[in-house]
Amino acid sequence: MIVIGILAFVAMPRFADKTAFEARGFRDETLSLLRYAQKSAVAQRRTVCVAIVSTGITLRFHTSEAPTGTCAGGTLTLPATPRGGSGLGGSDLSFLASGCAMPASGTGCASGTLTLTVANADNIQVDAATGYVR
């Protein structure tokens, strides 16, 4: 009886508040989509643009290998709808054919780290020089 009481005291709050769990799920989905965008840029040898809004991201590939200009090619969008009040923040970015990342206002591989914020979860960081998403 005591063990059941302890388990109920520790486990029940985790089941009652799903916000943190859902925010972590949204973060993981977004992380996977960013990794997919980077790998698609390398595999297709063209720029993949990542548009960031609070409800998720949209992936589009550039019609040529040029790193600048608008991404007018096909859409690589996959579902990434926030759950539990999660939201996404940060600036748009692009993955170049070499795999590196650049901010939307850039003209080539950036240096440093590009950061995306996720409500109620850890931030997502993109190493600009290598395109590594963590």
Image: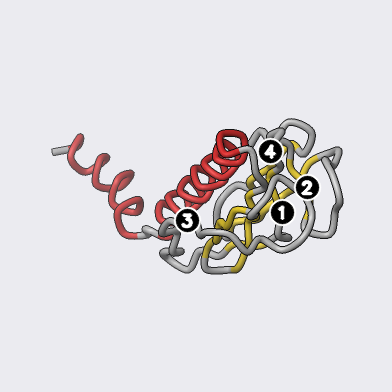
Disc 1 marks a residue whose amino acid type is Leu
Disc 2 marks a residue whose amino acid type is Met
Instruction: Say left or right for 129 vs 40.
Output: right
Residue ID at (37%, 58%)? 18
Label 4 sits on residue: 97
Residue ID at (77%, 39%)? 128
Residue ID at (13%, 38%)? 1
Mark nearer the N terminus (4 vs 3): 3
Disc 4 marks a residue whose amino acid type is Ala
Residue 10, quarter of picture? top left
Label 1 sits on residue: 93
Label 2 sits on residue: 102
Q: Quadrant of the C terminus?
A: top right
Spatial CA span between label 4 and label 1: 13 Å
Spatial CA span between label 4 and label 3: 31 Å
For mark 4, does the 10 Å Cα neighbourhood hold few (<14), some (14 to 19), or many (20 or more) residues? Answer: many
Does the residue at mark 2 contact the one at mark 1 (Cβ under 8 Å)?
yes
Spatial CA span between label 2 and label 4: 11 Å
Mark nearer the N terminus (2 vs 4): 4
For mark 1, does the 10 Å Cα neighbourhood hold few (<14), some (14 to 19), or many (20 or more) residues? Answer: many
- Which type of secondary structure does the marked residue at label 1 adopt? strand
Mark nearer the N terminus (3 vs 1): 3
- Which type of secondary structure does the marked residue at label 4 adopt? loop
In front of the other: 23 or 131: 131
Label 3 sits on residue: 23
Disc 3 marks a residue whose amino acid type is Ala
- Which type of secondary structure does the marked residue at label 3 adopt? helix
Mark nearer the N terminus (2 vs 3): 3
In front of the other: 44 or 103: 44
